[in-house]
Every structure is written in C-alpha cells, then in structure tokens.
Amino acid sequence: RGGPAICAQVLMYPGLDRDMGAASMVAMPDAPLLSREDIDYMHELADRGVGAPHDAYRIPAYAVDLSGLPPGIVVTGECDPIRDW
C-alpha cells in the first residue's frame, strides 16, 4: 500500500488460532491472567458484526498461504493457555 517493507514481525502473546481443545487450553482453563471465560468473551467481541467469523484476517491459523509474510518471532508465557495456538 505504499508503506515501507516490513522486514520482520514480533508477535507478543498472539491468539493465532481458536482451538479450545489445545493442550495448553485444557491444562490451564483458569490461568491467572487469561481464563477460558476471558478468551470466549474476546472471541465474541471480535466476531460481532462480521459475516464470516472464522476468516484468516482474524485467525491466521485459517490462512491457506502465509508465504508472503516476513519472518516472525512468537513470544508466549509459561502459564499462557493459548501458547499452543
């Protein structure tokens, strides 16, 4: 879009998927800073007013091809229920 080329990305605690059966979600449904209830609420907010709630723009794990993106670093926490996403 005419902006500078992005050479890298750093994703801090990203919600890249919605697999509520992921091992980290099952192991930590009531994590201290991010409970399953909190995650469900955030999904509800993100899905309001959109026709297709599971599109790749909001859930990168659903993308067919990510090859055009720059290299990335994903940062997760030890007690992060979404770290397996």
Image: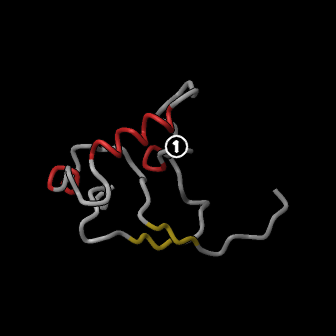
Q: Which quadrant would residue 50 be assigned to in this image?
A: top right
> Quick check: 2 left or right of 12?
right
Residue positioned 78% across, 70% down in the render: 4
In the depicted structure, whether residue 47 falls above or below residue 73: above
In the depicted structure, whether residue 27 falls above or below residue 3: above
Q: Which residue is mark 1?
A: 56
> Quick check: 83 left or right of 71?
left
User: Residue 18 appears at what percent x and percent y?
Assistant: 36, 44
What colour scheme governs how the chains and residues are painted in the rendered image of this protein? secondary structure
Q: Secondary structure at mark 1?
A: loop
Three-letter amino acid code of the residue under disc 1: Ala
Residue positioned 41% across, 64% down in the render: 13
Q: Which quadrant would residue 31 be assigned to in this image?
A: bottom left
User: Residue 66 appears at what percent x and percent y?
Assistant: 53, 56
In the depicted structure, whether residue 5 falls above or below residue 36: below
Q: Residues within 10 Å of mark 1 (few under 14, many from 20)?
A: some
User: Residue 21 appears at what percent x and percent y?
Assistant: 21, 44
Residue positioned 85% across, 61% down in the render: 2
Q: Nearer the viewer, residue 35 or 10?
A: 35
Quarter of the figure that contains the C terminus: bottom left
Q: Nearer the viewer, residue 32 or 75?
A: 32
Residue that sits furthest to the right in the current view: 2
Quarter of the figure that contains the N terminus: bottom right
Residue positioned 60% across, 74% down in the render: 8
In the depicted structure, whether residue 49 falls above or below residue 19: above
> Quick check: 38 left or right of 12?
left
